[in-house]
Image (tube, grey):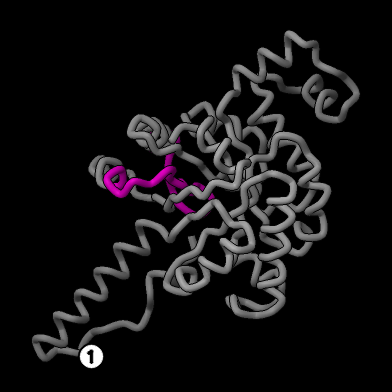
Amino acid sequence: MNGIDLGKALRGGVRVYGTCVISPAPQWPRMIAKTGLDFVFIDTEHIVLDRAQLSWMCQTYAGLGMAPIVRIPAPDPYLATQMVDAGAVGVIVPYVESVSQVHDLRGAVKLRPLKGNRLSRVLSGEEQLSQEERQYLTDYNQGNLCIVNIESIPALNALDDILAVPDIDALLIGPHDLSINLGIPEQYDHARFEEAVRTVFQKGRNAGVGVGMHYSGSDGKQKLSKWADWGMNLVIHSSDLCIVGNTLKQDIDVFRAQLGDAGKLSTNVSVADLHV
């Protein structure tokens, strides 16, 4: 899937599937391509990747037909532009809590290379672009996606105004941070958490944008049908870190049991506890 197809799917309510990828290993992209994923989610908020590694990953996954979307470490429009220049087709901005942050994201992703005072005037409505300029910027940024992370009570309170900003393609819930901000850490069955998820999903779909969740572990798998009923169509399952780590632990636990070493040097820590 390229950015144009992914954007159409998100806004049209079509479900798309991806995973978080943090490994820059050269063998990784071809292996992941065999899974049939529509996109990959590359995180730079919590994961250490330099610009060359990131660009290599974006270009390679795009070349293999999986749209690369990148989460930047902060709501910084210059970082967002940097990701698009590196080859990302989608930019996710973490912990968005204000309309002004969404306007900045829109300017960086949808109106580049326009910058500075003129961009500020266009975003505020003080200045209108000519038809020629609008067409040029639309063509120049075709397939670039704006994705907003919803992870806090202020974001929930500003949701209607955020969705009124033009050119948003999707909302993405960060369940771990949202649960903590709600005062119910990791209580994903709590009524307050479920109400927040349902509100984001339903308001997003009513506004014609994609809605999704980045989840890890079996808990998310059990809730998928319910989330889909609420409108979820951006499915980000776990990460290469969690999947490989948990699978390896399960195998080693089986080997220990088979060889009579159960309980020796084992750990109860799940890789899913690493919140990416």
Residue 261 image offset from top left, x and y in percent: 14, 89
Seen from the viewer's position, the closer of residues 210 and 154 is 210
Quadrant location of the N terminus?
A: top left
The image quadrant that residue 115 belongs to is top right
* Residue 203 figure quarter: bottom right
Q: Quick check: 23 left or right of 142?
A: left
Q: Which percent across, then down, holds residue 126? A: 90, 23
Regarding mark 1 in the picture, which secondary structure is present there?
loop
Query: Identity of the amino acid at label 1?
Result: Gly
- Using a 10 Å C-alpha cutoff, classify the residue at mark 1 as few (fewer than 14 neighbours), some (14 to 19) or many (20 or more): few
Nearer-the-camera pick, 56 or 236: 236
Question: Within the image, what quadrant is residue 255 found in?
Answer: bottom left
**Farthest-out residue, right:** 126
Q: Give residue 87's position: percent from left, percent from top.
A: 47, 29
Q: Which segment did they paint magenta?
A: 32-53
Between 158 and 101, the residue placed more toward the observer is: 158
On the image, numbered disc 1 is attached to which residue?
A: 263
Asked whether, in this view, residue 113 is left or right of residue 21, the answer is: right
- Examine the structure image and report whether residue 206 is included in the region drawn in magenta: no
Q: Residue at horizontal 33%, vertical 34%?
A: 64
User: Residue 82, percent across and down?
Assistant: 55, 31
In the depicted structure, whether residue 66 falls above or below residue 141: below
